[in-house]
Amino acid sequence: MKQYLDLCRYILENGETRMDRTQTGTKSCFGYQMRMDLREGFPLLTTKKVFFRGIAEELLWFISGNTNIQPLVQKNVRIWNEWPYEKYKKSDDYQNETMEEFIEKIKNDDEFALKYGNLGPVYGKQWRDFFGVDQLKELIEGLKENPFSRRHIISAWNPAQLNEMALPPCHAFMQFYVSSDQKYLSCQLYQRSADVFLGVPFNIASYALLTHLIASVCGYEAKEFIHTFGDVHIYKDHLEQIELQLTRTPRKLPQIKINPAITNIEDFTYEDLEIIGYDPYPAIKGKVSV
C-alpha cells in the first residue's frame, strides 16, 4: 500500500531521534495524515502478511465491550498478552511462569483470568460504557436518524480513567461522515501514538473494517478512511524491517465481503467476514515494546 510506504519514507527522511517510555528509542515525527479510498480495495498491507483474523477478532472484542483478554487468547489471538503478563510478573502470585504458561492459565482458569486478564477500562469499555453512555449505539442511531450531524464521534480517551488502563488509548478519537447523497460513510481516526511497523498496519485494517461494519448496518457503503497521527514513530529495533518492506512493490489490495444479513453490529462474528484476493509478501517479525 503506497500510502503506508510513503509514511515510512517520510519518517526515515524527516524524523527525529527520541527516547520513549519503553526505553527502546524511536525515529519520530509529529503530525501526519493518510487517506485511503475503501472502494478501491480493503487496506490490508501487502508488503508483509498481516494477521487479519487477529484484527477482526480484536475489533469484535472491542465492539462487545469486553476488556479481559481471555476471549482473545482462547482464539489464539495474542495482541494484548504482553501488558497483563508484565503486570502479573510484579504480583505476589508470580512464580516465574513463562509468557506461554501465563497464557495457558488465562485460557483455562476463569478465576485466574478474572484476576490477571483484565486490561482495565480500555477501548471496549469506553466505546460501550463511557460513564454510562453507549457511544457505539448512539453513533449508529445518529448515523441512521441524523446523517448530516457533525457529532458522529466516539472517544476512547477518558482522562478520568487513564490510570486504570493497562495502556492509555493510542487510537483515541474517531469521527464519521455521511456523503450528501446519503450513499457513503467515511471515517477519520486520530491516533495520538503510532508504532508504524507493528501497530499501524493493524490500526488501518481495524478502522477500515469498523467503517465497513457500521456502513453495512446503517445502509451505507464504506467510502474513505482518513488516518491522522500525532506522534508517529518507528522503533529503532524495527528499522531493518521497515527497510525490507520498502524494497517490496505493493500488490493489488484484496476485497472484503461482509454478511449483509447482519443488521445489529453486536451480532457479527469472524465467519461473517471474508477477505478475497489477499496476496501479501511473507510476514516480517518484530519485537513489541511494552
Image (cartoon, grey):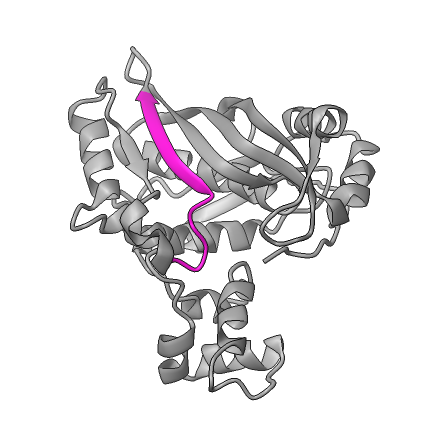
Q: Which residues are magenta?
A: 165-177
Note whether 269 is above or below 7 in the view shown: below
Position of the N terminus by quadrant: top right
What residue is drawn where x is 46% and y is 77%? 106
How many badges with numbers are in the image? 0
Residue 258 in view here: yes
Position of the C terminus by quadrant: bottom right
Note whether 155 is above or below 61 in the view shown: above
Q: Quadrant of residue 156?
A: top left
Residue 170 highlighted magenta (yes or no): yes
Tell me if 255 is positioned left or right of 118 in this view: right
Residue 43 in view here: no
What residue is drawn where x is 42% and y is 75%? 116
What residue is drawn where x is 21% and y is 20%? 149
* Residue furthest to the front: 19
Note whether 267 is above or below 101 in the view shown: above
For the residue pair 239 and 21, the one nearer the viewer reads as 21
For the residue pair 200 and 182, the one nearer the viewer reads as 200
What residue is drawn where x is 23% and y is 48%? 130
- Image coordinates of residue 72 in percent, x first then y, are 46, 64
Note whether 242 is above or below 224 in the view shown: below
Residue 267 highlighted magenta (yes or no): no
- Image coordinates of residue 56 in percent, x first then y, are 47, 50
Tell me if 279 is positioned left or right of 110 in this view: right
- Image coordinates of residue 253 in percent, x first then y, are 63, 31
- Image coordinates of residue 289 in percent, x first then y, are 63, 55
